[in-house]
Amino acid sequence: MKKNKIFALLLATLFALSLFGFVSCEQKPTPPAHFVAKVTEVHEKQLFVTVIDKGTSGLGNGTPAYVSIPSGNSETFVVGDYVVVDFDSMVQEIYPPIVPNVFYITKCDANGIPLK
């Protein structure tokens, strides 16, 4: 009888530790990222840009990339505009890369300072 209680206690402890380990392995939210780019092509739902300052993104300077224009975006873009792209840090690593989950795109100067 005493062995059964010890076994049950040991089993319950192992279960609790396993459950704690499972809960602690939840995926952490990815911090947002940004970069500064120059618009080279304008399409209906995306921009083709060249990165000029990688900021906190994983893209390198000089990298061409497609950037999805977020729905509800009120700004219009033309070739030659400089923009800051804020996104969820996910980049589809094909060539050229695609940045699909954009929070917003802000016009800026060549140094990344937003235009007012």
Image (spheres, grey):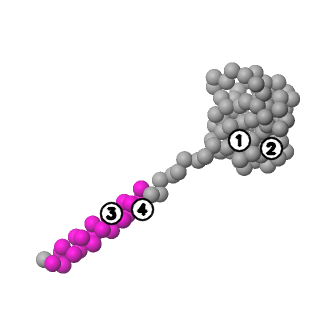
SS at mark 4 in the image: helix
- Assess disc 4: are there few (<14), some (14-19) or many (≥20) residues with their C-alpha within 10 Å of its C-alpha: few
Q: Nearer the viewer, mark 4 or mark 2?
A: 2
Q: CA distance from mark 2 to mark 3?
A: 48 Å
Q: CA distance from mark 4 to mark 3?
A: 9 Å
Of the image marks 2 and 1, the number of the one nearer the N terminus: 1
> Are discs 1 and 4 less than 8 Å apart at CB?
no
What amino acid is found at the position of numbered circle 3 in the picture? Ala
* Tag 1 residue: 34
Q: Quadrant of residue 6?
A: bottom left
Q: Write the start and end of the magenta stretch as one range.
A: 2-23
User: Quadrant of the image for the N terminus?
Assistant: bottom left
SS at mark 2 in the image: strand
SS at mark 1 in the image: strand
* Tag 3 residue: 16
Residue 49 in sight here: no
- Assess disc 3: are there few (<14), some (14-19) or many (≥20) residues with their C-alpha within 10 Å of its C-alpha: few
* Tag 4 residue: 21
Depicted 47 relative to depicted 62: above or below: above
* Tag 2 residue: 53
